[in-house]
Image (cartoon, rainbow, N blue to C red):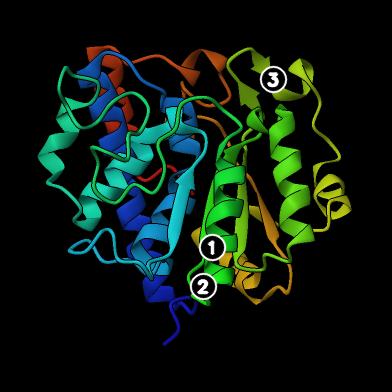
Amino acid sequence: MSQYSFTQKDVVRLEAQAQQIREDIIAMIHAAKAGHPGGSLSAVEMVTALYFHVLNIDPQNPDWPDRDRFILSKGHACPVLYACLARRGFFPPDILNTLRQYKSILQGHPDMTKVPGLDMSAGSLGNGLSIGVGMAMSAKLHKQDYMTYVMLGDGEIQEGMVWEAAMSAAHHDLKNLTAIVDCNGVQIGGWTNDVMCIEPLADKWRAFGWAVVETNGHNMADVLTALHTAKTMRKPTAILMRTVKGKGVSFMEDDPKWHGAAPTDEELVAAICQIKEGGIM
C-alpha cells in the first residue's frame, strides 16, 4: 500500500495518536511554565498524519539521505513537533518534560544540531519556505525522489521572503515541494486579518504558480486526502488547512492569549480532561 493511501482503521489510529500528542503538548508546556500551546494544538492533525503515516523516515537513521523532509517554519509551535518525534521513536518521550530547561535538547525554538530528526532550526519567521525550496531543488538536481514539506503560520506569510520563495518554487517547477499553511486566524498581535489581511489566500498562491488544496485541518481523513492530492500535483502545492488556534481545549480556542502562555495547575487538569474526553471532533 502506498504511504499516501489510507483506510478507516488508519484514521482511527491516527486520531488516537493525535489525542496523545495533544496531551503531550499541554503537559510539556505546563512543566516548562512557558511555550506556545495555541499554534501547536492547531497543527496536531497535520503533523501527526505526516509523522505517523506519510513521511518516509527512519528513526534509527535520522540523517538518511533519501528521507522525506519536514520543516516547521513556525518554529515557536515546536511542542507539536517534539511530541511527534518522541512518540515516533527519535528520542525517549520522557525527555519532553525537559522543554525549555537549561541544557535540554528541546529548546523554545527547534535546534537541528541537538534534536534527532529535525531538518531545520527555526526562530525568525519567514525562513522555512526558502530553505524548503533549496531542499526540493537539491532533490531534483541529484535525482532523488524525496518530498519536502514546509509548515507555515498564516501570520508568518505576511513576511515578504515567503512570497519570494513561492515565486522561485514555481519557476523551478518544484512539484516535490508542499507548503502547508496553518490557517488558524490568530497571531500574537490578535486576529490575523486585523493585523494584516492575507485573503484571498488561495488566489495568491495560485497567482504565484502553485496548485492549491483547501482542507479542514482537524478532520484526519480530510488531512490525509489533502496530502495525497498534493503528491499527485504537477507543480508545487499549497495546502491551506483551516484550523482553530488552541483546538481541543475550549478555553484556549480562538484566544490570542494562548499564542504564548502556559496553563496553571488547574488549567492543566481541565485541559487534559477535555482532551481525554475526545472533544476534538
Q: Position of residue 261 (x, y in %)?
A: 40, 14
Q: In which quarter of the image is residue 245?
A: top right
Lower position in the chain sequence, tag 3 or tag 1: 1
* In this view, 166 is above or below 27: below
Q: Where is residue 71 in the image (x, y as percent from the top left)?
A: 47, 47
Q: In which quarter of the image is residue 141?
A: bottom right
Query: What whole-number distance in Å separates the C-alpha atoms at marks 2 and 3?
Result: 42 Å
Q: Residue at x 29, y 51 (%)?
A: 117
Q: Dot 1 lies on which element?
A: helix
Kind of residue at badge 2: His
Q: Residue at x 49, y 31 (%)?
A: 39
Q: Quadrant of residue 210?
A: bottom right
Is 94 positioned to the left or the right of 229 in the image?
A: left
* In this view, 271 is above or below 256: below
Residue sitting at the far front: 141
Q: What residue is pinned by disc 3?
A: 191
Q: What residue is pinned by disc 1?
A: 138
Is 171 positioned to the left or the right of 268 in the image?
A: right
Q: What residue is pinned by disc 2?
A: 142
Q: Marks 1 and 2: in contact by CB < 8 Å?
A: yes
Kind of residue at badge 3: Trp
Query: What whole-number distance in Å separates the C-alpha atoms at marks 2 and 1?
Result: 6 Å
Q: Residue at x 49, y 52 (%)?
A: 46
Q: Residues within 10 Å of mark 2 (few under 14, many from 20)?
A: few
Q: How crowded is mark 1: few (under 14 residues within 10 Å), some or many (20 or more)?
A: few
Query: What whole-number distance in Å separates the C-alpha atoms at marks 3 and 1?
Result: 37 Å
Kind of residue at badge 1: Ser
